[in-house]
Image (spheres, helix red, strand yellow):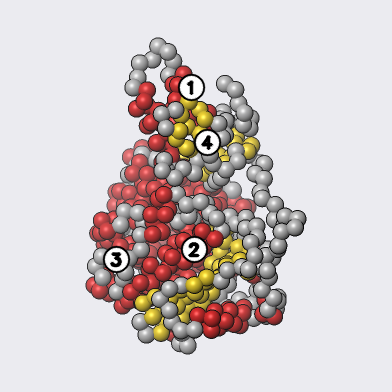
């Protein structure tokens, strides 16, 4: 086969990598399942980019002369599968173009060996061409308060707009210019210009909605909510923010709600240069706020020339009207759910139920309610599985209303993973969630937990790290990456991630607890004890981290104290089965440790990734432990 394209064992195009040696397709370090014949077709196409490969040639490559198959059906199926995993379409091809009745052509971005960056368009101006005008206003200079900057821009646009108008308008440059290359961006919190501090939740909700809409665009890396919210009220310049988050562009703006009208001003700024690229003001009735959010996202995608798949165009344009009171309750539910404590979770549930009572057809409210019941099990302290009926009911209702929400497929994946232990269906739903929204950081973290449960540590590490890339200032994702590293036995790296999480939030309880576990297994007992003492200070609860402390006792010759502690908490409910089993394991009492795990397995009150935990290593050679793994269909 003559190859006119790049020659390498591992090739990259867009966000995909192809390993020609192993026949594997990867995206963001996560392996995507692709049948052998589909892979061979893809290989032929990317090795000859821009060149038509005839159907007869594919027939000779895929099926020997003495093979009798329905060739037309076979090649059509192979190409369709390629498009499915790449998020492509025959009508508007991004990667594989059909030449009717003749063959196929790879029309995607440059295919290069891994480790080599594709050539980017030069940012230098064409000689003799006019340069893009720069908005030379004093408040663009570094050091000017960001809130005043947004305020003046909002005021200027408002004055130009005159009065509330139904049609949005656009600020156009007076001369053409070369569009900057933008592959990543962050939406920093939109300012609240409603003259009411109590409306901050509404501005934050609009910010999150814009992030969520843009996140559906596969060709963009969009920074997730937690990291974006880190810059609320910041005085940092936009280039500083862009450098910290490693993004090409920043979106900022303001929200004003007055009566039943909502106005949003958004502007796109080039991160490196602070150059103003685009600005637009939108205004709608409150019931059309979802339509407005979709319009803003589509306008930004069009401005930065990102290519949208047919599916992405459909998702972005599928906006609907909504009862303003229902949407308001939905935003208040999100506001309280983000606090992740028992009282705020209970409030969030009330608000989501109110949103559903007002508008029973709003799928995101059901999905948010199901997710909050999940959170109630963990952060609300109820225990795994206690709210599964509510989770299932609301997830399935959301699915009935909208099958294209990535959040809903992530919920399904967690149901199959947490409750049903149906590994095949769980993985399928994780991958579906990622296909629908490649920027949803939670999908990668939960998928990492699943992958590690299956013993696929390399993929799990890649998925967890990608979640951090999407939300680099989130203590939760940093701590979760640390947990994946810990279970991969990379203890020093795990501790480094916990430390980074604690730099961002010194009182982040999961990071303190997990760091104590890591120090304990590393034999750094003084450091582990210091983490537990810090945990007591942060929570004001001397019982916090008690099982880690008992395990520490078991390792430091205080077996009597460890056993007494276990006896004292025997009737606690819910009980941390992994923690109790770890203490028994550290005491050398393997039978009691396995008793605890067997009971947890019977009641499904334990996470599958528990069985990968290094604290259970003293039990692994025991026949009963191996039998547990077989019962759960987990790798030994």
Q: Where is residue 95 in the image (x, y as percent from the top left)?
A: 50, 40
Q: Earlier in the sequence, mark 4 or mark 2?
A: 4
1 or 2: tag closer to the N-terminus: 1
Residue depicted at 45% across the width and 21% down the height: 56
| Cα–Cα gap, marks 1 and 4 | 15 Å
Q: Which of marks 1 and 3 is in front?
A: 1
Residue placed at 75% from the left, 55% from the top? 127
Check disc 2 and report the residue beneath it.
299
**Under tag 4, what secondary structure?**
strand
Q: Nearer the viewer, mark 3 or mark 4?
A: 4
Quarter residue 150 falls in: bottom right
For the question of whether residue 33 can be seen, the reply is no
- How far apart, in angstroms, are the residues tagged by discs 1 and 3? 50 Å
Q: Earlier in the sequence, mark 1 or mark 4?
A: 1
> Would you say 13 lies left or right of 138 here?
left
Q: Residue 57 carries which label?
A: 1
Where is residue 210 shown, x and y percent of the image?
Answer: 46, 66
The residue that disc 3 covers is 362
Give the percent coordinates (x, y) of residue 72. Answer: 36, 25
Q: Can residue 70 be seen in this view?
A: yes
Instruction: Calculate the distance from the C-alpha at mark 4 to the C-alpha at mark 2.
Output: 28 Å
Q: Which residue is drawn at 55% across and 55% down?
A: 305
Q: Which residue is drawn at 38% across and 67% down?
A: 291
Q: How crowded is mark 2: few (under 14 residues within 10 Å), some or many (20 or more)?
A: few
Q: Mark 1 packing: few (<14 Cα in 10 Å), some, or many (20+)?
A: few
Q: Which residue lies furthest to the top in this view?
A: 66
Q: Disc 4 marks which residue? A: 106
Quadrant in which the C terminus is drawn: top left
Circle nearer the N terminus (3, 2): 2
Q: In which quarter of the image is residue 341?
A: bottom left
Left or right: where does residue 635 sit relative to residue 153?
Answer: left
């Amino acid at each position: 086969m003559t190859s006119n394209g790049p020659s390498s064992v591992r090739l990259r195009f867009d966000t995909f990598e192809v390993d020609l040696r192993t026949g594997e397709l990867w995206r963001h370090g996560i392996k995507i399942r692709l049948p052998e014949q589909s892979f061979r077709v893809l290989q032929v196409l990317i090795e000859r980019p821009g060149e038509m490969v005839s159907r007869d040639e594919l027939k000779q490559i895929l099926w020997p002369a003495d093979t009798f198959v329905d060739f037309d059906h076979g090649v059509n199926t192979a190409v369709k599968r390629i498009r499915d995993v790449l998020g492509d379409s025959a009508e508007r091809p991004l990667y594989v173009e059909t030449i009717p009745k003749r063959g196929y052509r790879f029309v995607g971005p440059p295919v290069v060996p891994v480790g080599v960056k594709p050539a980017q368009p030069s940012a230098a101006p064409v000689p003799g061409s006019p340069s893009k005008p720069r908005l030379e206003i004093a408040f663009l200079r570094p050091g000017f308060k960001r809130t005043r900057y947004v305020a003046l821009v909002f005021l200027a646009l408002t004055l130009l707009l005159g009065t509330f108008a139904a049609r949005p308008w656009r600020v156009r440059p007076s001369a053409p210019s070369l569009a900057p290359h933008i592959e990543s961006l962050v939406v920093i919190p939109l300012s609240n210009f409603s003259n009411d501090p109590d409306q901050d939740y509404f501005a934050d909700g609009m910010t999150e909605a814009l992030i969520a809409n843009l996140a559906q665009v596969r060709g963009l890396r969009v920074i997730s909510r937690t990291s974006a919210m880190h810059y609320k009220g910041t005085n940092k310049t936009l280039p500083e923010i862009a450098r910290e988050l490693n993004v090409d562009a920043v979106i900022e703006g303001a929200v004003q709600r007055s009566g039943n009208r909502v106005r949003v001003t958004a502007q796109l700024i080039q991160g490196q240069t602070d150059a103003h690229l685009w600005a637009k003001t939108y205004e709608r009735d409150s019931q059309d706020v979802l339509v407005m959010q979709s319009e803003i996202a589509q306008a930004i995608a069009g401005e930065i020339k990102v290519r949208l798949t047919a599916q992405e165009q459909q998702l972005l344009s599928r906006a609907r009207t909504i009862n303003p009171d229902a949407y308001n309750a939905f935003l208040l539910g999100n506001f309280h759910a983000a606090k992740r404590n028992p009282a705020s979770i209970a409030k969030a549930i009330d608000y989501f139920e109110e949103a559903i009572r007002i508008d029973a057809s709003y799928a995101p409210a059901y999905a948010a309610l199901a997710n909050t019941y999940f959170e109630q099990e963990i952060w609300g302290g109820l225990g795994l599985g206690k709210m599964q009926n509510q989770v299932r009911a609301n997830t399935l209702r959301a699915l009935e209303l909208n099958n294209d929400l990535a959040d809903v497929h992530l919920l399904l994946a967690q149901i199959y993973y947490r409750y049903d232990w149906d590994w095949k269906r769980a993985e399928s739903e994780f991958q579906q969630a990622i296909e629908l929204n490649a920027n949803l950081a939670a999908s990668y973290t939960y998928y990492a937990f699943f992958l590690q449960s299956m013993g696929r540590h390399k993929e799990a590490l890649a998925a967890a790290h990608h979640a951090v890339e999407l939300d680099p200032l989130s203590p939760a994702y940093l701590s979760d990456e640390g947990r994946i590293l810990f279970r991969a036995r990379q203890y020093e790296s795990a501790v480094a991630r916990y430390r980074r999480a604690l730099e961002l939030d010194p009182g982040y309880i999961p990071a303190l607890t997990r760091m104590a576990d890591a120090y304990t297994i590393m034999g750094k007992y003084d450091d582990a004890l210091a983490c537990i003492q810090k945990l007591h200070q942060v929570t004001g609860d001397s019982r916090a981290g008690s099982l880690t402390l008992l395990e520490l006792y078991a390792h430091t010759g205080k077996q009597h104290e460890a056993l007494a502690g276990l006896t004292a908490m025997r009737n606690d409910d819910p009980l941390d089965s992994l923690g109790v089993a770890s203490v028994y394991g550290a005491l050398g009492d393997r039978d009691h440790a396995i008793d605890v795990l067997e009971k947890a397995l019977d009641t499904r009150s334990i996470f599958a990734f528990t069985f990968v935990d290094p604290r259970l290593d003293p039990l692994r050679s025991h026949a009963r432990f191996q039998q547990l793994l077989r019962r759960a269909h987990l790798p030994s």
